Image: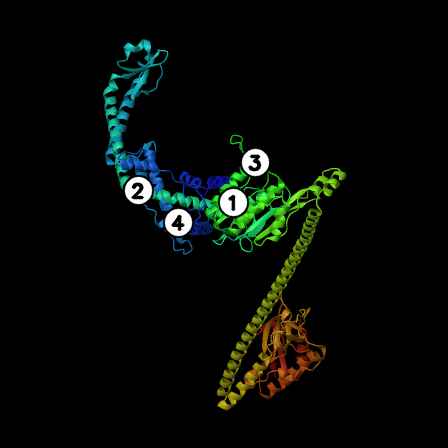
Amino acid sequence: MRQRNLRVLELNKILSMLSAYAVSDMGRERIAALEPSSDPYEVMDRLKRTEEADSVISYTGGNPMLAFADVREPLKRAVAGAALNPRMLLDVAESLRAARGVKSALVTDREDTPLLRGMAQALTTNRSLEEDIFDAILSEDEISDRASPELYDIRRHIRQCNDRVRDKLNSIIHNPNMQKYLQDNIITQRAGRYVIPVRAEARQFIQGLVHDQSASGATLFIEPMAVVEAGNDLRQWTAKEQVEIERILRALTAKIAPDAEAIAGNLDIRAELDMVFAIVYLGREMKAVPPKMNIEGRIRIKMGRHPLIDPAKVVPLNLWMGQDFTTLVVTGPNTGGKTVTLKTVGLMTLMAQCGMMVPADYGTELAVFDEVFADIGDEQSIEQSLSTFSSHMTNIVSILDSVTEKSLVLFDELGAGTDPTEGAALAMSILETLRVRQVRTLATTHYAELKAYALSTIGVENASVEFDVETLRPTYRLSIGVPGKSNAFEISRKLGLPESIIKSATEKLSHEQIRFEDVIQSAEYHRQIAERERALAEEAHRETQALRDQAERERKKLNEQRDEMLKKAKDEARRVLQKAQRESEQLISDLKKAKAKEGHAYKDHELNEIRAKLQGSIDDLTGGLRMEANTVTEPPKDLKPGETVELLALGTKGTVINPPDAKGEALVQAGIMKLKVHVSQMRRAREEEKKKPKPMSSVTLAPRQASMECDVRGMTLQEAIAAVDIFLDQCVMQSLKNVQIIHGKGTGTLRSGIQQHLKKHPSVAEYRLGKYGEGEDGVTVVTLK
């Protein structure tokens, strides 16, 4: 694409912002060279890579790219046979490590990143070479002792020579006889030789070689003869060290040369990946989305924002064209946002064709164009004697010569800078030429003739940018389908221009012009009213939707609570049923044992009858399992022993034996079973049901073993005394001696009343409270005469 168009639409500024997110110089170099592609398949691939990179960052939580140096020059030197210095070798090793890190991050089992995985699979790694370099070179200034056995041995000799020289020099500078000749008691180096500072006047007292003197000449730096030989040995070993280091560097360079081409290929791949991930990070900063692309010339921008305008101030843009109409004429006052509209459409198109996300909402659709032509701004040239109009017309001529039906053309103030009548006529002719050629064209203008042209021509549509006359400020909102009004008279009136001048100017307009402007103003007025009403309707719809969603959530919550309560009730009933069945079987077993002791045995049909009766009682108890899910009853308060309650979960009635405990659970007698029930699962029985006399059959009188005790819990005192009398008479008839009356602990009313009655009973010899294991205070043990 032409560089002028890219510059006018300010793509270079976007690329500059993009460079800040790259981690390498080569990535920034690739970004600087990035240009929009006109190949639809390449554009699709670029955007697909961007989406895959966004997915990788979301999955891993960070950028898989590691910083790497540009090692193209060191690779060329290695191929040429020149030895690389430590810094270059370290850069190559770091480049290999970065390639390995990227490959391990992108070559995974994920199926949603095929393009990035393919790029990463092309990366060449050489961990052996990478580790050899890092093991041999500690920094650009230091080679490891372990780089080779020879280097280790040489440095061992160097340390030994150093120690010998320093020991000898230390003995000299600490000799009391020598200190008077020394300037300082220190050991230093000159020209790679160890020396001591000697006063110039004491030169004849220190035998040795002078290697240097101070600037004043007062101090001579002498290497004593006693260490000259050791110093010579040190120099020889140091020279050997340098030779060995050079050999090591050449050996490492020789290992790089065969892989130089592959490493260079790695650089290109990683530079491309660096650019792709930088695109994602810039897109996230802009809150951008990947646009849907087409090759039919359709443009639909939803809440688009110019990326170079402050996000806190930019007004989102909604624009569509290319399907029902190919030409869009935007009118409205100056500074109203017309030029920003052009640049937003053009810049977003260029960004998308570069593979970048665009700052808009999901659903945005852009087209792939072979060229985006832009005639925006004033490029008049004094040197070329070009006026504003001439400059624009020169550019327009060039556009008309190059444009195709696959191009996008942007005109700012088309036909301006010359006679309005002629300019409007030229503008209409240019637009008509492009319309006939099916070129997607977006133009801004102030000419009323172009508004009328758009109203009367198929394939051309009007649009306008709003302007608030009351505040003299543009709203920057674009409205498609309504031509704009310049508002020159209203703005002038607000700014204080005398009314007489405005009236005179109005009279100079033709009747058709005034009528046309009035129609536009009326249409704009009603459009704004409709827009406000639509906004209110949408707000009301959102509120209604929110209330409906809340009601639905509440309904689901109530249903879940009802289902949970029903489930708990069924579970409780199931446990009660299983317990009752176990107890009934145990009772039958006990009856059989008792009969067997008396020498008799139940026949099968008798046992079946007993079992059927017990099962019938169980069925009567559990058959009423109903959950009144929609009935909310208040839990009964202040329940007392002996009160009759309805068990909601079981659909039956029971008698309270013990009042609710701290958990709200009361012990209730229901038929032959006793169970704990929460107060929320019961309610007081109605008065008429409470007043019904309790049937005496609640006292279980089984033959023999069953008659050893009488359970009167839950009865009133009068009912209990009557039941005890019947029980004692039967016991006397069966010649039983010791029996038990179970009255429970409770409030003690039954216990004291029954014991008072036993004192007067003619068949009772004595009685006492139960001991540990017998029921204690809840049981009275009676001895019969």
Q: CA distance from mark 1 to mark 2?
A: 38 Å
Looking at the image, is mark 4 or mark 3 earlier in the sequence?
4
Judged by depth in the image, the label closer to the viewer, 2 or 4, is: 2
402 shown above or below 588: above
Tell me the quarter of the picture where residue 222 sits: top left
Residue at coordinates 32% horizontally, 34% vertically from top-left? 86
Q: Amino acid at mark 1?
A: Leu
Residue at label 3? 388
* Horizontal relation, residue 312 to residue 10: left or right: right
Q: Amino acid at mark 3?
A: Thr
- Residue 24 at x, y = what percent? 41, 40
Q: Earlier in the sequence, mark 2 or mark 3?
A: 2
Q: Neighbour class for label 1 at 10 Å: few (<14), some, many (≥20)?
A: many
The answer to whether the residue labelled 1 contacts the one labelled 2, judged by CB atoms less than 8 Å apart, is no
From the top left corner, tell me how far across and down residue 252 is, in percent. Answer: 27, 37
- The residue carrying mark 1 is 347
The residue beneath circle 4 is 105
Label 2 SS:
helix
